[in-house]
Amino acid sequence: MHKKKNINKKCTCVHTAESDKHESRCHKVVEWCGAECVRVVERPRPVITEPGDVILKVTTATICGSDLHMYLNLVPGMEKGDIMGHEFMGLVAETGPDVKDFQVGDRVVCSAVIACGNCFYCQNGWFSCCDNTNPSDLMEKYYNQKIGGVFGYTHLTGGFDGGQAEYVRVPLADNNLLKIPDSLPDEKALFLSDIVCTGWHANELGEVSKGQTVAVWGCGPVGLMAQAWAKFRGARVIAIDNVPYRLQLAHERLGSLTINFDEENVLDVLEELAPGGVDVGIEAAGFRFPKTFLHKLQNLVKLEDDSSDILTEQIMAVRKMGNIAIVGDYFGKTNQFPIGALMEKGITLRGAQVFVQKYWKELLGYIEKGQFDPTFVISHHMALEDAPLAYQMFHHMDDNALKIILHVSDPTLEDEERKRGGQEGRERERGGWTPTQHPQRK
């Protein structure tokens, strides 16, 4: 058992979410400017701000379902000018003096969640619960405690600049980057930043094992990854959604049994498929989808923040002593939650943002060996400049949009970048570099 005194142990890697900016060099970013509005603009390029930083030249990024929460301005803590995106990868363009594991030119994936690696939670593998990477007090106001920082997300999680940009500052890089072999194209490695790990995380939280029946609510990219990993573990999978092309993909590519909740009663069909209840329910949809009139009304008039319709359905569908895993996002409070059924049936319910750093090396191994291919979710390839259109397509599900890859820059470093990174690195080794030599943040 861990001693309680360790919970409040402070690590030495205190840092800020705000990056210093270059005086003259600019780059393109996807900037949030209000509900259903993003634009591509030029902003000052980030520079090394703290000694553990890396400046990453982004090669590819993608739009996540949770990006839509911010896009639609449905969560607290968004500010105009925020740079979007938490799923991205690229090349190391510059390193701070404390970076030990990476050098200029390394090809890496960046974790969506930012972890210090040293606190009680990181030491136990619960990286998204890190005590030391969220400088914002906003989350503490809501939840009494903070979780770790997240790139390109609400200021609840720090307000870090996101990776839908040509360059991004990665704090505490030794713990938040993963080297990728040249044999893997970006499309196979990129999703290790979030959804590949989140799908695995759902199975870990739900303790999915061979021979079980697992029902997954939601057939977006995260729900599909959860289904794929459940099949990988030998489970029987049932997919629940109301979007035909997503259900078709779940059935044809993953072999999942499917339920369209617009056409069938979910609980009735699940009872036929799994008499007595499914072993595990995975919630991969989130707070934005009330199904009943009551929750739609309460949501409309702001009597609740999040709908519990899907969780209620799961509690009714899961067998006694079964498990529920929540990886769809919830932020606020809900009404009519069936706590009695949850308790009396002995159901275990777990949720957490993904522990990327706990899983990604193992999952990279499966991808390298050809045992798992995450590219089945990709529907479109677009340029960074087309991000406003990409967000519209993804939100409205135009052209069967599912997972849109944003191609940001060429997967090479210019000679000037290599020279600059190497020169600054040598200056640091000689002790001739400090963050104050960079232009101050603006």
Image (cartoon, helix red, strand yellow):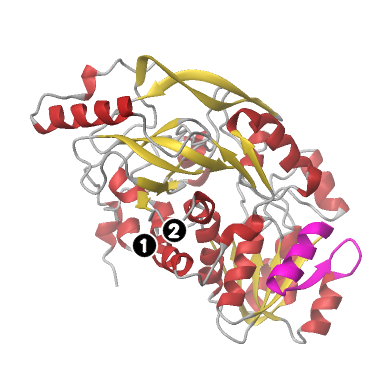
Residue at left 42%, top 57%?
A: 183
- Furthest-right residue in this view: 263
Q: Amino acid at mark 1?
A: Gly
Looking at the rendering, which quadrant does residue 265 occupy?
bottom right
Disc 2 residue type? Phe
The residue tagged with tag 2: helix, strand or loop? Answer: loop
Q: Is 305 included in the stretch rendered in magenta?
A: no
Which residue, given by chain and number where applicable, does mark 2 sit on?
A: 355
Query: Where does the N terminus fall, quadrant-wise?
Result: bottom left
Q: Position of residue 348 (x, y in %)?
A: 57, 73
Q: Provide the secondary structure element on which disc 1 rests.
A: loop
Horizontal side of residue 135 vs 102, given as left or right? right
Question: Does residue 369 appear in the picture of this structure?
Answer: yes
Q: Which residue is mark 1?
A: 125
Which sits in the foreground, 420 or 156? 420
On the image, the x and y values in percent for residue 361 come to 38, 63
Query: Which of the 4 quarters of the picture holds residue 167?
Result: top left
Give the residues drawn in magenta, as a range.
Answer: 242-265
**Horizontal placement of 25 versus 218: left or right?**
left
**231 relative to 112, above or below:** below
Q: 241 or 318, which is in the foreground?
A: 241
